[in-house]
Image (cartoon, rainbow, N blue to C red):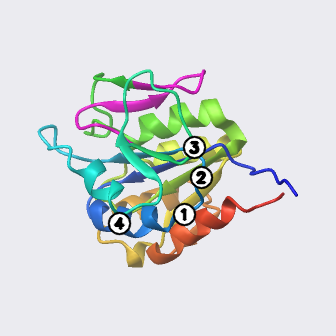
């Protein structure tokens, strides 16, 4: 019995409090052929890239730093490198850019979300987690406009609630979930047979 997963990729945006949030969400994704997951975590430009190693040890999926022109693969989480925007190109390969900061951020959540929305359209899931600014709100609105599924961490469960609240003001979000429910929710989408 085969079934069709209705989505092709997940994008996640997170800022202040992100390490703890990603530590809850990503290890809950346990389907071996889980669709590609692309993550922008706001980091300082000088950050050591320990985050992929740290998360890879804790996750069923392979967690790695995204590379320019890399094709997307199932079962993999791609993290934007410090000081680079992460984008999706029309051929579904990744692209890295050092263009100007967006919302004072590079990587910017909006840049990832907006490029991914144009590529994946209604087959994209966008997730906004904890954060202390409004980055990601415009991008989540773009995902919704293209017919994608939008998920926001319930602000009261966020270490910093500005980013979830900004997203909820910008778009009629499909699902507002406590942090501990987001990973299991995404995992369940992979079993969806619609």
- To which residue does mark 4 refer? 23
68 relative to 170, above or below = above
**Which quarter of the rendering shows the N terminus?**
bottom right
- The residue sitting at the right extreme is 1
**Real-space CA distance between mark 1 and mark 2, rounded to the nearest whole angstrom:** 7 Å
- The residue sitting at the left extreme is 46
- To which residue does mark 2 refer? 34
**Is residue 161 shown to the viewer in this render?**
no
Closer to the observer: label 3 or label 4? 3
Badge 4 crowding class, 10 Å Cα cut-off, few under 14, some 14 to 19, many 20 or more, is some
In the figure, residue 20 lies in which quadrant? bottom left
Q: Earlier in the sequence, mark 3 or mark 1?
A: 1
The region drawn magenta spans: 79-95
As for residue 91 lying within the magenta part, the answer is: yes
**Real-space CA distance between mark 3 and mark 4, rounded to the nearest whole angstrom:** 20 Å
Q: Earlier in the sequence, mark 3 or mark 4?
A: 4
**Real-space CA distance between mark 3 and mark 1, rounded to the nearest whole angstrom:** 12 Å
The reply to whether the C-beta atoms of the residues labelled 3 and 2 are less than 8 Å apart is yes
Q: State the SS at label 2.
A: loop
Closer to the observer: label 4 or label 2? 2
- To which residue does mark 3 refer? 74
């Amino acid at each position: 019995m085969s079934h069709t997963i209705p989505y092709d990729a997940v994008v996640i945006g997170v800022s202040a409090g992100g390490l703890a949030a990603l530590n809850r969400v990503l290890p809950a994704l346990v389907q071996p052929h889980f669709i590609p997951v692309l993550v922008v975590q706001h980091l300082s430009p000088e950050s050591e890239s320990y985050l992929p190693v740290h998360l890879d040890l804790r996750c069923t999926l392979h967690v790695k730093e995204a590379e320019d022109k890399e094709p997307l693969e199932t079962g993999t989480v791609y993290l934007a490198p410090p000081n680079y925007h992460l984008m999706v190109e029309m051929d579904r390969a990744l692209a890295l850019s050092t263009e100007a900061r967006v919302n004072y951020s590079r990587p910017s959540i909006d840049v990832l979300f907006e490029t991914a929305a144009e590529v994946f359209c209604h087959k994209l899931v966008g997730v906004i987690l904890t954060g202390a600014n409004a980055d990601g709100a415009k991008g989540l609105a773009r995902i919704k406009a293209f017919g994608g599924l939008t998920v926001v961490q319930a602000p009261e469960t966020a270490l910093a609630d500005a980013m979830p609240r900004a997203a909820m003001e910008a778009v009629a979000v499909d699902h507002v979930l406590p942090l501990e429910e987001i990973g299991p929710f995404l995992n369940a989408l992979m079993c969806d047979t619609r």
